[in-house]
Amino acid sequence: MKRLTAAAIGLCLSLGFHASPASAQVEGEPFIHDPSTIVLSDGKYYTFGTRGGGLVSEDGWTWRGGPERPGGGVAPDVIKIGDRYYMSYAVGGGGMSGGHASQVKMMWTRSLDPKSPDFKFHDIGVVASSDGVETVDAIDPAFLYAEGRLWLTYGTYFGPIRIIELDPSTGLRVAGNQPVDVAIDMEATAMMYRDGWYYLLGTHGTCCDGPNSTYHIRVGRSRSPLGPYVDHMGVPLLRGGGKMVVNARGRNIGPGHFGLIELPGGVEKFSMHYEADMNRSGRSVLGIEPLLWKDGWPVAGANVRPGTYEIQSERSGYALGLATDFVRIPFNARASFMAKPTDPVSPVADQTLADNAAVWPQGTTRVDLADYMVRPNQLWTITPVPGAGGYFGAPFYKITIAGTERALAATARNEVETVPRFTGAAEQLWQIDQLTDGSYRIAPKAQSGPKPLALVAIGASTPTLAPFDANSAAGRWTFRLP
Amino acid sequence: MIGKPLVRCLGITGALLLGAGAITAASAGAPAGQEVAKPSLDAYFKPATATPLAPDQDGFLRRWLLLEPISKPNPTNTVFTASYVRQALTQQYFPGQFTAMPRNGQVVKAAEPLRWHALDSTQFDVKLFNFAQALGKPTYGVIFWAVTVVDSPREIRNARMAVGSNSASMWWLNGQEAVGLYNDRRMVMDDVLSDRLTLRKGRNLIRGAVINGPGLSDFCVRFLDEDGRPIRDLKTSLK
C-alpha cells in the first residue's frame, strides 16, 4: 500500500473551491487531506493538512481555507501545551517519489491565527527520522499529552508505527529516548488516554484512491504508552490487530487520520478526512462524527438521522410530548378480557393525528414527559434545516410534531414549548450532539445566558432548559423509532 | 396486578365494570361481618405544634393543614385529563377555598361539614389515604385540600416547586397556579416541577388539591434551587 504521490495531493488541494451540496457533517469548503487534531486558537477552530494549508471554523460546522503554516510536507499534528501550539509535520518519506527517507520536524507558535501578533512559528528541529533504507517511514506524527508526559507516534505501512517521548517544555526529544515499535499495518496514527488506558488508533486500508479507497480507522489499547497494544480480541497491534472504529458510511468513503475533539459538557467527537465525499465530486474532505465509548473501546457514533421518533428521557424513560389531554383509543375492555382464545382477532387502528390534535390548543403549547403511548402528540420529526448553520459535525435541526409544522421551541424564560408553525427562528433550531454512551444532548441554538443550556428533565415528567451536566442522565435523550 | 387497577380483579371476578363497582369492592376490604380496627393517625402523622417546623433533610414539607375529603366519585383515575382536573379543582366547594387561611379544627361548609386538621407528616410524603381512613372518611372518589405556610429567610429566585401526587393534583403559590399533575399518576418525588418562581422573603402560602378515584392517595412537595438542590432552610407553620 502506498500513499498518493505529492503531485497528486497537490492537484487535489489546489483545485478551485466552490459551493457544495449540504453534507451530513460539515458545510463550507472542507477540502483537506490528513487533517491535524482540531484545536482552538483566538476563538476559532483550526486544522492543518498535507502541504501548507488548513481549515478554520468559528462553529465546527462551516469550514473554510485560510490557515497557514510553514514547512510544507505532509500530515501535521498540533497540540497546545501551556501557551504554545506545538506543530509536528513530516518532510519526505511516505513513498512519495519512491522514497522513505523522512524527517519529523517540530515548531511552535503562540497563535494559529495569521492575523494575530502572536502568530509566529519558531523552529524546534527534527525529533525523528528514517534514512530511506531502514524499514520505517517517519511521517504522520501524532501527539499525546497525558500524565504530564508528551508522546509522539509516527510511521506508515512501510515498517512499524513507532513512539517517542518529547519534552513538553521544549518540544525536543527527551535525551536518550529510543523509539519503540508499537504497531504494524497502520498509518496516520493518533493516541488517546482514558481511564488508565492508552489507545493507539491508526488508519488501515488503501489511501488516496477516491471512492475506491478502503481507508478505515482501527484501535488497540495498552496500560503503557509503550505497549503492548492489543485489540478487543487480544490480537497485538504488532501483529496487525485493531478493533474497528469507523469505516465507510453512506456517501462518505475512506475515513482516515483520527483526531479527538473534546467539547464542553463531556461531548466527544473526532475529526478525520474522508477520502471521498460522494456529494463533493469524490474529493477528500474533513469529517466530524460523534465518538462513543462501549465497554472501554472507542467507536464512531452517528448524528441523529432525519426521521420520526419518540424522544425518550434517559432520566425517567418518559416520552417528550405535547402537554395536552390524553385521548383514549376506543376499546371494549369487556370483550377483550372475556374473549375466548379461539375468537377471531382484528387490528386496532392507530390513533390518527386528527383524533389526537382535536384537543390541542391553537397557540403555543407546553411540553411534558409522560408514558410513551405511540400517540401523535409524542411523535417528533427531526429535520436538518439547510442554511441554518450547525455545530461540530451536525447541522441545526427543527423538531416538529410528525405530520405538522408545530415546532419545539425555547421560551424567553428558558422553558420549552411548541409553536404552531416553524419559522426558522433561532429558538426553534436545535443542536443535537450524540454523547459518549450513544444518547443525545439536545440544546437550543438560541442561548441567552452565560451557561450553555440544554433540554433537561428536571423532574420525572418535567423538561426545561438548564445547564447540561455530563454526569447526569437528566440531560440525555434517546431517539427511538416509534 | 401492580398499581392502580383500571378495574379490580379482572381475572378472578370478571368484574369488568368501569362504574361504581370498583369503589364498592375496594372499600370493602374486610371479609363480610368482620370488623377491622382502623389504623390511627399516629402511624403517619403527629399533631402540628406552634413551633415552626423545618423541612426534612431532603427538603420535603411536612406540616400541613388537611381538609377532610370532599366527595367526588370517580370509579377510575383514567378520567383525570388536564381539562377534567382543572375543572374539578378550580370549582368552589366551600367558602374561602382559594382565599382564606384555615385554622386547625375549623369546619367548613361544603356539601357536608368538613374539618381542617393541622398535622405533621412523619414521612417525606403526606399519606392522604391513611389520613381519611383514620378519620373514618371516604378514601376513594375524593378531593383533598392541603394548605401550608412556608417562611423563607430570604427571597429565592429561580426556585421550583417539586411535587409528586397520587393521583392528579394542582398547586398554588401565593395565589398563583404553580404546578399541575394530570392523568392517572403515581406518587414519585420530583415528578412535576413548576416553572422558575420566586419564594418571597417571609411568608409564602401554598395551597394544593389532590383528586383521587380508587387506590392509595398521597403527595410530596419540596422546593429546589436553581441548581436542583433541595431548599432546606425554610420553616413551615400554619398561620
Image: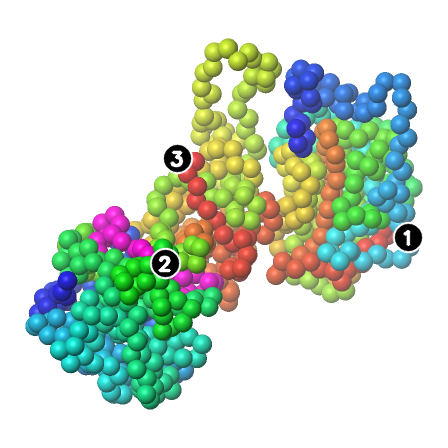
The crowd level at tag 3 (other Cα within 10 Å; few <14, some 14-19, many 20+) is: few
Which chain is home to disc 2?
A: A
Marks 3 and 1: in contact by CB < 8 Å?
no
Residue nearest the observer in this picture, A322 or A48: A48
At 17% from the left edge and 73% from the top edge, which residue is drawn?
Answer: A135
Q: Is residue A258 magenta?
A: yes
Q: Which residue is mark 2?
A: A234
Amino acid at dot 2? Gly
Q: What percent of the width, then of the height, locates residue A145?
A: 39, 76
Residue B31 placement: quadrant: top right
Residue nearest the observer in this picture, B32 or A242: A242
Name the mark on residue A33: none
Amino acid at dot 1? Thr
In primary-sequence order, the first of circles 2 and 3 is 2
Marks 3 and 2: in contact by CB < 8 Å?
no
* Residues at marks 2 and 3, CA–CA distance in whole angstroms: 50 Å
Q: Which residues are magenta?
A: A243-269
Do we see residue A347 in this rendering? Answer: yes
Q: Secondary structure at mark 2?
A: loop
Name the mark on residue A403: 3
Amino acid at dot 3? Gly
Q: Which residue is mark 1?
A: B49
Q: Does residue A16 appear to the left or right of A219 in the view shown?
A: left
Q: How many marks?
A: 3
At 82% from the left edge and 47% from the top edge, which residue is drawn?
Answer: B121
Q: Is residue A15 magenta?
A: no
Marks 1 and 2: in contact by CB < 8 Å?
no
Q: What percent of the width, then of the height, locates residue B197?
A: 65, 55
At 22% from the left edge and 49% from the top edge, which residue is drawn?
Answer: A251
Residue B21 placement: quadrant: top right
Asked if badges 1 and 3 are on one and the same chain, I answer no
